[in-house]
Amino acid sequence: MQQKKYRLSVEMGGMKNFLFLIPLVALVITAGCVIQNNNPPVPPTPQIVYVTVLVTPIPTHQIVYTAPKDKVVAATAQQIDATHMIVTYQGGQDASTCIAILWTVTLSSGSATSTVMGSTSLPASPLIVGTTATLPATADKDHLVGTAYFSDGSTQVIFDNSL
């Protein structure tokens, strides 16, 4: 019978341990629910929302810029002495529409002078081929620019050089 008693005490010891284990597990679960969580709250994960948008095109007007056609006229310049130069209108394919030439000479000293050949006001008669003008000059290089005016209101630089 001693063996049985021994067996019983082992079985009883196992039951005591089991009965002790139930309140221990309950205590651990309760403690986990009662203890405050000190971790900062995790922000919610952003949600991706797909939206279908219907785009209706608005009719547009296309603006087309056409560059003006270059006019064909010519002029020449020649320094005749230390203080003067002569400019001459030579005409050209568009001579019938050239009404004036504005000459601007910038002397080597920096001063500038302008002279008009013909009339820049509309309506005007075409400039006569062979028209000349005498402009001031220096013995050094002077910068000369000739801007032609046309009967359609356009202008064009036809001479830009240093003499």
Image (tube, grey):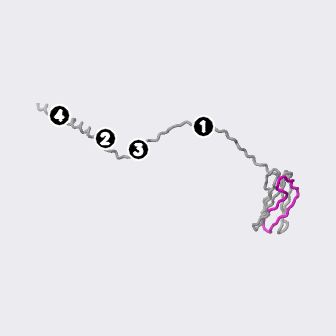
Residue depicted at x 23% and y 37%:
23
Residue 55 disc label? 1
Q: Are marks 3 and 2 in contact (CB under 8 Å)?
A: no
Q: Is residue 60 left or right of residue 35?
A: right
Question: Viewer-proximal residue, 110 or 33?
Answer: 33
Amino acid marked by disc 3: Val
Q: Quadrant of the C terminus?
A: bottom right
Disc 2/disc 4 C-alpha distance (Å): 32 Å
Residue 134: x %, y % from top left? 85, 64
Q: Mark 4 or 3 closer to N-term? A: 4
Residues drawn in magenta: 114-142
The residue carrying mark 4 is 12
Of the two numbered discs 4 and 1 in the rendering, the one whose residue sits closer to the viewer = 1
Question: Viewer-proximal residue, 42 or 87?
Answer: 42
Q: Secondary structure at mark 2?
A: helix
The residue carrying mark 2 is 33
Q: Are marks 1 and 3 in contact (CB under 8 Å)?
A: no
Disc 4 packing (10 Å; few <14; some 14–19; many ≥20): few
Residue 5 disc label? none
Residue 121: x %, y % from top left? 82, 55
Q: Mark 4 or 1 closer to N-term? A: 4
